[in-house]
Image: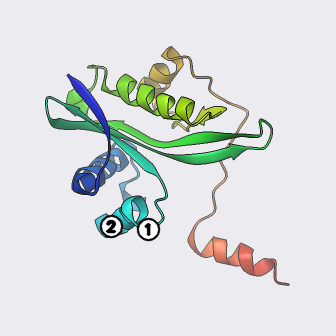
Amino acid sequence: MIDIAPATPADLPDIHALIRALAEYEKLAAICTGTREALGEALFGAHPAADVLVARVDGAVAGFALFFPTFSTFLAQRGLWLEDLFVVPAMRGRGVGRALLAAVAGVARERRCGRLEWAVLDWNAPAIGFYEGLGATLMPEWRLARVTGERIARIAASSLR
């Protein structure tokens, strides 16, 4: 039986370990530098930045979904951004990913969101097939833009000139 529940601070060690496993899977471990303490503050501190659902199969942690609110100016509606969805390799093919995505979609529906969006690495054929099989539309004409660290500071400083 798959059980999906909102994460609690007691789930923090499992969530952090799952994030590390996701980074390894995506070949991005070198940039996965967040500490358990920082994650705990971000998820369960005074101003939570995201929601997390944890999936368990027969009591064992099987995966997680982490998401946060967005807003569409075109729709004039809230949305949700699914930052991470990860299922432990030994638990794949048992409906855990589908259950997690269904639960996130349920939150989007409850919050009257006009969009539920996420990104997928272009080489991750299993995930792409999974998402398309659920009815998701890949947006090939869109590219993510990202600024991190010192570059954020440089851009911010450039507006002062």
The answer to whether residue 94 is seen in the rendering is: yes
Q: Residue at x 28, y 20 (%)?
A: 93
> Which of the two discs, 2 and 1, sits closer to the camera?
1
Q: Position of residue 143 (x, y in %)?
A: 68, 42
Q: Quarter holding the C terminus?
A: bottom right
Residue 92 vs residue 121: left or right?
A: left
Q: Label 1, on which residue? A: 46
Which of the pair 8/120 is nearer the observer? 8
Q: Position of residue 147 (x, y in %)?
A: 63, 63
Residue at disc 2, secondary structure:
loop
Q: Residue at x 74, y 81 (%)?
A: 157
Q: Amino acid at mark 2?
A: Thr
Q: Label 2, on which residue? A: 35
Q: Amino acid at mark 1?
A: Ala
Residue 101 vs residue 80: left or right?
A: left
- Circles 2, 1 touching at the beta carbon (< 8 Å): no
Q: Residue at x 70, y 77 (%)?
A: 154
- The alpha-carbon separation of the residues under discs 2 and 1 comes to 18 Å
Q: Residue furthest bottom?
A: 161
The answer to whether residue 34 is seen in the rendering is: no
Q: Position of residue 15 (x, y in %)?
A: 29, 50
Residue 125 drawn above or below residue 145: above
Q: Neighbour class for label 2 at 10 Å: few (<14), some, many (≥20)?
A: few
Q: Quarter holding the N terminus?
A: top left
Where residue 155 sits, quadrant-wise, is: bottom right
Where residue 30 sits, quadrant-wise, is: bottom left
